Image (tube, rainbow, N blue to C red):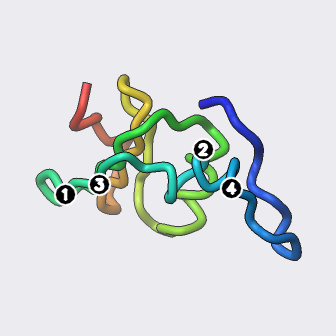
Amino acid sequence: MTGPDLPPPAEPMTAEAMLSRWPSAAEKTELIDGVLVFSGRFDERDLAAVQRAYPGRRPLINADHGLEVHPSGPGRPHPRVS
């Protein structure tokens, strides 16, 4: 996803960041077989935010550039959306 990084914690949120970063830029959120799926165009910066927001879970970016948050467990999860 193109767009700015999130502002530092002491700075106010910008409209541009709100429209391009997870979670506010998610176009749709679904729960599919216990997996949270955030539709949108996300990148590694968003994945890092998801990892902090859902400790112990297994998030990944799927083939559609959406974010998936899988339950905790062994191994790498398989994407639900492809």
How far apart are the alpha carbons under marks 3 and 4? 20 Å
Circles 3 and 1: CB atoms closer than 8 Å: yes
Q: Which residue is mark 3?
A: 29
Under tag 1, what secondary structure?
strand
Kind of residue sitting beneath label 4: Ala
Going 41% across and 53% down the picture, which residue do you hit? 58
Kind of residue sitting beneath label 2: Ser
Circles 1 and 2: CB atoms closer than 8 Å: no
Q: Which residue is mark 2?
A: 20
How far apart are the alpha carbons under marks 1 and 2? 22 Å
Count of numbered badges drawn on the protein? 4
Residue nearest the viewer, comparing 44 with 6: 6
Kind of residue sitting beneath label 3: Thr
Q: Which residue is mark 1?
A: 31
Circles 3 and 4: CB atoms closer than 8 Å: no
Q: Position of residue 71 (x, y in %)?
A: 30, 61
Going 44% across and 30% down the picture, which residue do you hit? 65
Under tag 4, what secondary structure?
helix
Mark 1 / mark 2, whichever is N-terminal: 2
Q: Is residue 81 left or right of residue 49?
A: left
Q: Nearer the viewer, mark 3 or mark 4?
A: 4
Circles 1 and 4: CB atoms closer than 8 Å: no
Q: Nearer the viewer, mark 1 or mark 2?
A: 2
Q: Which residue is mark 4?
A: 15
Q: Badge 4, how many Cα within 10 Å: few under 14, some, many 20+?
A: few
